[in-house]
Image (spheres, rainbow, N blue to C red):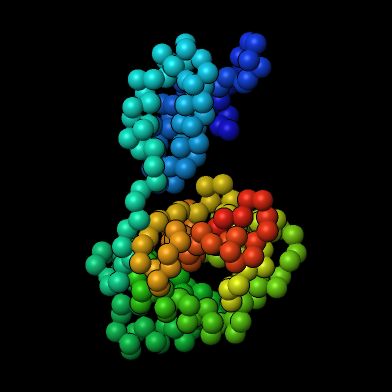
Amino acid sequence: MGSCLGLERLGDLGLERAVLWDLVSADLAACDDAGFFAAATHRRQAAALMAVCKRWRGLLGPLSRSWKARARPPPPKKRALVATTPAQKNSLAEKCDLVRLARYETVSLGRREAYFDVSCRPITVKAEDDMELLSDLSTWGERFLDFWDRGVYACARCARPLYASDDKWSGPCLWPSWRRDLPGAARHAPVEGYNGYVVDVHELYCGGCDLFLGHAFADARDKGDAHPDARWRH
Ligand SMILES: [Zn+2]
């Protein structure tokens, strides 16, 4: 809940009634991709209030029309097969082999600039393949796959905290699996047509610096996550 969210008791119903005015105006003004899911949560709370209280329905109802217009996550976009945007064309993956491979040779765990320079949003097939290749060549196996110490995993480029060890689980992939990112930590971009998957798939980018992090698949329960919140496999 945002700090501007005041709470008061709703009489005999015993429910907490959110005083949403500051929140509403702040959310609608700043309802970009990064704030979208948090804003959607607040709008659901407002909808719940409207359902139980006539006065709040009158106050919040007119605003709810604009909320409904954005009530659903954006529809999945086609996966970017080739570079078309300036950011994609600027990826190191698109440079000539002479430049690209020379810089790839510099990548190590202690020196990742060239790896970062491959990333773009939306990620292209070529950039993703090259990031995977560089990751494999640098780590020779995933260093965090069987790592279970408690703590927070942060972005390697901007140090933004992204994942908590409490949300890590033993998935089927060569890379470690989490069931969710920290609230608002990553940018989620639904995509369709990713490698034949029929479940929902999101591209994931660091919410601080846009570094491509990988994908999230809505198949965690089928892949063995027994947690009550199991759905996503990041
Ligand atoms: Zn970052």
Image spot of residue 74 (x, y percent): 35, 48
Q: Quadrant of residue 226?
A: bottom right
Residue positioned most to the right: 149
| Image coords of residue 123 (percent x, y) | 37, 67
Q: Which is more toward the observer, 25 or 103?
A: 25
Picture residue at 39% right of the left edge, 68% below the top: 194
Against 72, is 126 above or below?
Answer: below
x 46%, y 31%: residue: 43
Residue 63 occupies quadrant: top left
> From the image, which quarter does the N terminus lie in?
top right
User: Please, which residue is most extreme toward the left here?
Assistant: 84
Q: Quick check: 163 above or below 224? A: above
Q: How many numbered discs?
A: 0
Classify residue 42 as left or right of residue 85: right
Q: Is residue 161 visible?
A: no
Q: Position of residue 163 (x, y in %)?
A: 61, 57
Residue 142 place in picture, x, y as percent: 61, 77
